[in-house]
Amino acid sequence: MTLETIQVLGTAATVYGLGGALSVLLQARQMYVRGTSCDVSARFLGVYVGGFAIWLPYGFGIESVPIILVHAVGLVCGSITLAVLLWLRKTTVAVANRSAAEDPKAVSKEARGQWRTSARTQPCT
């Protein structure tokens, strides 16, 4: 491959990587608008953010600007999305606990797995 071809591929990979890193913010927006994070895996996001956290120091170690750029953006965007997820999970648990305290029957229904509420008030499992 020629040097020009390698530079074009490097630029394309960097742009594509930035797009991928930024795309997780769409998930954060969707969770925030819906008011629930039950359909998103917290473990996945933890692994996702962890990958960026590992690659970033590697990029610094080899002094690669594209790797540093993509993984710094990915770490920030992934962390924001994970923070939204955790904030919504904390909120739904607090609302569910408040509902259970107000309605003692809800506790027994929940224990039997028959608690029927909206996704906003039902804690994620």
Image: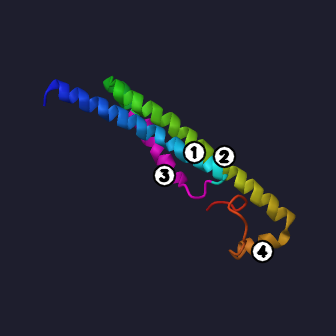
Residue type of the residue flagged with mark 2: Trp
Report which quarter residue 10 is drawn in: top left
Amino acid, disc 4? Ser
| Mark 2 burial class by Cα count in 10 Å: few <14, some 14-19, many 20+ | some
Question: Residue 58 vs residue 125: left or right?
Answer: left
Looking at the rendering, the stretch of residues picked out in magenta corresponds to 37-55
Helix, strand or loop at mark 4: helix
> Given contact means CB atoms under 8 Å apart, are the residues at marks 2 and 4 in contact?
no
Q: x, y percentage for residue 54?
A: 41, 37
Q: Amino acid at mark 3?
A: Phe
- Colour pattern of the rendering: rainbow
Distance, label 4 to label 1, CA atoms, is 33 Å
Pointer 4 residue = 108
| Disc assigned to residue 87 | 2
Give the alpha-carbon distance from disc 3 to disc 1, as whole Å. Answer: 14 Å
- Residue at 25 percent of width and 32 percent of height: 9
Residue 118 image position (x, y, % from top left) = 71, 64
Q: CA distance from mark 2 to mark 1?
A: 11 Å
Q: Which structural element holds mark 1?
A: helix
Pick whichever of labels 2 and 4 is earlier in the sequence. 2
Residue drawn at x 64%, y 47% as measured from the top left: 32
Q: Is residue 109 above or below residue 50?
A: below
Image coordinates for residue 78, horizontal then vertical, percent: 51, 40
Q: As rendered, which of 38 and 61 lies closer to the eye?
A: 38
